[in-house]
Image: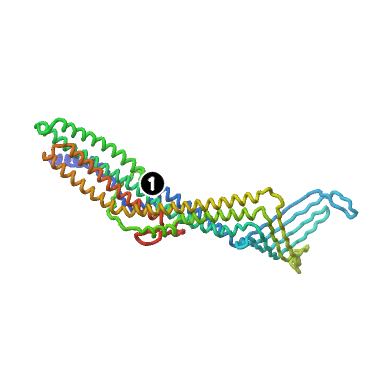
Amino acid sequence: MKLYRHFLYFTLVLIASVCVWPVAAQTPEQAVYYSLSEVIRLAQERSPDAMIARHRFKRSYWEYRSFKAGYLPNLSVEATLPNFNRTIEAITQDDGSETYVERTLARYSANVSLTQKIGLTGGTVFLQSGLQRLDNFFSDTSTHQFLSSPVTIGFRQPIFGYNEYKWDKKIEPLRYEEARRQYLETNEQVASTAISHFFNLLMAQVEKGIALKNMANYDTLYNIAKGRFILGKIAENELLQLELNLLRAEASVETANLNYENMLFTFKSYLRLKANEKIELIPPVQNDFYSINVEEALSEARTNTSSGLNFDRQILEAESNLNMSRMQGRFDAEINASFGLTQTSDKINKAYLNPLDEERISVGITIPILDWGQAKGRIKMAESNLELVRTSVEQSRMDFEQNIFLKVMQFNMQKNQLKIAAKADTVAQKRFDVTQKRYMIGKVNDVLELNNAQIDNDNARMGYYSALKTYWNSYFEMRRLTLFDFRDKRKISVNPESVL
């Protein structure tokens, strides 16, 4: 009998273990909590907008590096190994007659060149060294010759032409600095987008909590009202109103759930989070309130942002086009000169002995006689375009500064706006709690008063988070428009190496 009891006890323990083990193994997934600063950091690291901005900056960086490399000495090697030619050609004989002769020859050549652009004048200097070999093949014999050019120095200099190098040295650094500042501005814009997604999800989260709370409250009130109706203390229309409120609250829960799931998907998609990750948002509780001086903001915006450089670059490019139009199609001249040493021999070692001087110089000129007004037309169009760009830039500067002024005024308003919203939330919550308690104990019999208190409470809560969202968007909007952190009193910058 004792053995039977032990066996039964062991069997029951085993069955209980088998039944409980799967439940214990399925531990609920822990939620990951995200603060606003953490969301901004993740967005600036992995969001699609941040990745696109990084790749655009990388392209601009390497374009600028390529431009700077173009002004460094360029070393190159050219070779022909070999150039074989077998043809029948007409050759003039000693008596002046011509005859066709079969010729077979092969040429070999190798040249090393070092070139350097001169940005100030638009010319090019070069240093060369080369060696050539010529093989002539006849029916019964063959000859070999070497032509050496140990060193050749020369230059090519346009006299009145358009100096592309000079203008590029002015424009390209501006273009790169503009791209660097645009990357910083995009980074701040990514922060603003992340703030919008954060507060959209947070407000959906709060709205969902409000809907669930309202449904629970109206369920309780409806059950209380049914008891009062049976006792004859309230009219039937009041009971029906509470039932209607309960049905509306249940519908609001479903709507809030759908809105929350939609905002959650958008939030995870932008931050590239796992689809099955459970998250909770931590509402920001500390806000840094300070005022911004309009003149200081305008000064920082002119100095730091890409817009100021963009205005200058547009004018420089228009001036460059005007200069090119004035230079092209007009009187032009170009000088090509070189000096070197050269020698020829049938043996390679003798081709470098006692080299002879080799000088070359040429001056070419171009004089347009009749172009039917084409050059004049190009100049007039370029002049008109320059004035158009200047007018457009002047208007853009005014609009830019006016936008800065308005944004500063809006930011300076946020302190009071947020305090008002917080106070309204506190008052509306207290009013609803008092009205609800008075209704439950029978001191308030008007259900419409309870409805109004509940609606005002919900609107005030959502209004507070909407004011928070506006404040943080305005905060990063000012950072983007000025590339200056007024809280820490420092310019916003980036190390290009960290981006690359």
Question: Is residue 291 depicted above or below 232 in this figure?
Answer: below
Q: How far from the left and from the top, in percent, is residue 16?
A: 20, 41
Q: How far from the left and from the top, in percent, is residue 121?
A: 62, 62
Q: Which residue is nearer to you in this view: 25 or 200?
A: 200
Q: Residues within 10 Å of mark 1 (few under 14, many from 20)?
A: some
Q: How far from the left and from the top, in percent, is residue 199?
A: 32, 47
Q: How far from the left and from the top, in percent, is residue 300?
A: 41, 59
Residue at screen point 10% across, 31% down: 230
In the displayed orientation, state which residue is furthest to the left.
231
Direction from residue 405 to residue 31 in the image, left or right? left
Res 14 seen here: no
Direction from residue 393 to residue 418 in the image, left or right? left
Q: Which residue is nearer to you in this view: 423 or 97?
A: 423
Q: Which residue is mark 1?
A: 270
Q: Which residue is nearer to you in this view: 435 or 396?
A: 396
Residue at screen point 13% across, 31% down: 235
In the displayed orientation, state which residue is furthest to the right.
95
Q: Which three-letter amino acid code belongs to the residue tagged 1?
A: Tyr
